[in-house]
Image (spheres, rainbow, N blue to C red):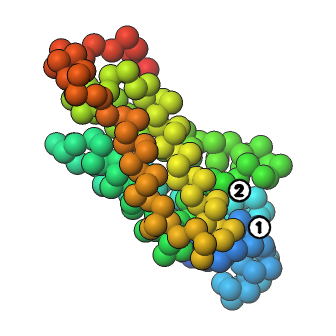
Amino acid sequence: MTKKRLKHIDRQKQIIEIAKELVSEGGVHNLTIRKLTKKAGITEAALYRHFNSRDDVVINLIKEVNEKLIETIKSSINSDGNSIDDLEKILNLHYSSIELRKGLSFIVILQASEFESQEIRQAGNNLVRSYLKIIEDLIYLGIKKGEIDRTVEPESASMMFFGIVQVSVTRWIFDPEHHPLNEKSKSLWNLFRTSLEFMDEDLELHRVPFQSNTNREK
């Protein structure tokens, strides 16, 4: 890789990091070319050498957020542990990150749909789909291991989990003082956990080896 190409990549990374700061401070709509260039200490012409437009910056930001989010979630999952415990760990991780104003992922997801750009909307959709797939697979694993009620539909449960996080983020963004996430996390988690667990009278049923009617390899 040439030095010129390396410098281009480094500058792109720097601009994306600044974009993250701006979004964390005031949402995606706080991300403007003027603010980017001012914070980066470069001219607009210099910025356009690395990105074609503001939309291009947003798309690359979403891709970066996607990679970091998936990486963080996967590192939280213990393949030898309990799937329900892993889900709780992921939820608490989200809440702690958001309250430290690092909950960039869900702010971006929330606001990506507001853009007219089809490319931005698609990038946001890809982020959501990647996230849901990991949660869905974790729930399916829990069913297979006999930790989660086998009547639970993994796709629906993953959407429910995502919804809990997203609505919490939305309320917190508008009024963080009156909707502290750490106070709500336990009650929300208990509600979700109850929907996953099976009753004691169903214990014998869950001792029978699980057989799925769907092809998870698709």
Q: Crowdedness of circle 2 by 10 Å Cα count: few (<14), some, many (20+)? A: some
According to the picture, the residue beneath numbered tag 1 turns out to be 29
Q: In the picture shown, does residue 40 fall above or below 204?
A: below
Residue 179: quarter of image:
bottom right
Q: Crowdedness of circle 1 by 10 Å Cα count: few (<14), some, many (20+)? A: few
Image location (x, y in percent) of residue 157: 46, 34
Image location (x, y in percent) of residue 137: 37, 33
Which residue is rendered at x = 73% and y = 86% of the image? 38
Q: In the picture shown, does residue 154 fall above or below 112?
A: above
The secondary element bearing badge 2 is classed as helix
Image location (x, y in percent) of residue 97: 46, 68
Tag 2 or tag 1, which sits nearer the N-term?
Answer: 1
Seen as rendered, the residue at the extreme right is: 116
Residue 138: quarter of image:
top left
| Residue type for callout 2 | Gln
Q: Is residue 152 left or right of residue 77?
A: right
